[in-house]
Amino acid sequence: MDGKRFGMERPSSTGATYGPWLVGLGAALWGTESAWRIPLNALFDASVIVFWEHVLILIMFLPLLVSRLDEIRKIQASTLGYVLFSGFAGSAVGTIFFTLALKYGNPTVVNVILNIQPVISTMAAFLIFGDRLATRFFLYASIAILAGIFVSVAHPALIGVSFERAGLSKGTGFALICALFWGLSTVAGRGVMIGMSLRLASSLRIVVGLTCMTLILLAYGKLHGAALWPVAAQAHAAKAIVLLVLLASVSGGIPLLIYFQGLYLTRASTAGYFEMMQTLAAVCITWGFFHATLHSHQVVAALILIAAVVMVHRVQQQAEPHT
């Protein structure tokens, strides 16, 4: 949510009537990524999936980057720092942890838990930029965190016995780490958007992300043919290519353009509600197609979590009416 994948600050706008629907469409398309990422986990390592994702998105974004190259020399050092951090934290590392979370956890739980990200980004903006926190922020943030705990635990009565018996998995931990990185990346996006155009920021974000992924694969000895295109992918080459292309296009570059065009045409206070389409789409896919079901208490906790995050968004909009 809130541009979490790409760490961009939402522009202020009064907008057209179709703006919120563009936000919803872009967010819903982002929510489809589990449909491609989950089967890709059976063919590639998580870091390799993210590497190929960045390669393909960069190819799509090359015309945008080339058309804005003359702006690069005007970028201030502080803005460049924000781009580097957002590319590293959000585009590269955060996405790796999201991919791992889908691999080792209940995908439905993972996608619901990620709704905690706006709480993290709000706190980070308070600590880094001195943003004002609404009086009721801590109330709703606490509710969201407690609800997130209950969503994560399949058998809460057994939590006193062991975390494993209670149903906590590595996937939940990876999802929380992902939310942290994406939340910090969103805050860094504020500094990015102040200093450069959206098209250049989006393109450079992918360039930085791909550079980081290349260095990560090099450090772990995976920057070679056998790791980049392993035996499993060779055995299902057509499937691997189609899934990677769908991940990079339907759930990557295309929603990015739709989403931010919608944000330019939508009031910030309205856009936050339409962003919930991302969770709805993700849950429909993970539950409906991959049968990653939730217990009844997890469904209730998920609804409370989403409602609490909506309230965090709402009270913060009231505290900062100029955003």
Image: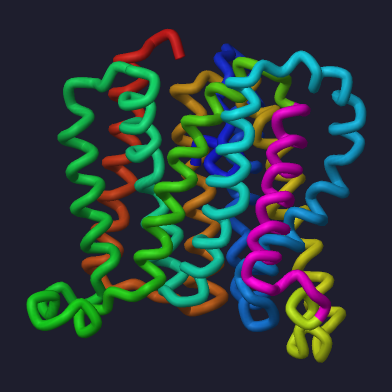
- Image spot of residue 119 (x, y percent): 33, 38
The segment highlighted magenta reads: 199-225
Left/right placement of residue 20 relative to residue 169 reads right
Can you say whether 214 is above or below 18 in the image?
Answer: below
Quadrant of residue 246 in the image? bottom right
Left/right placement of residue 155 relative to residue 115 reads left
Q: Residue at x 18, y 43 (%)?
A: 142
- Image spot of residue 192 (x, y percent): 61, 24
- Quick one: 42 or 181, which is closer to the camera? 181
Q: Residue at x 22, y 29 (%)?
A: 137
Can you say whether 289 is above or below 178 in the image?
Answer: below
- Quick one: 271 or 72, which is closer to the camera? 72
Q: Is residue 204 magenta?
A: yes
Q: Residue at x 34, y 36 (%)?
A: 310
- Image spot of residue 305 (x, y percent): 29, 49
Q: How many marks?
A: 0
Can you say whether 118 is above or below 57 in the image?
Answer: above
**Outermost residue, top side:** 322
Q: Residue at x 39, y 35 (%)?
A: 121
Magenta stretch: helix, strand or loop mostly = helix
Q: Is residue 48 magenta?
A: no
- Image spot of residue 161 (x, y percent): 10, 82
What colour scheme has been applied to the protein in the rendered image?
A: rainbow
Left/right placement of residue 303 relative to residue 21 reads left
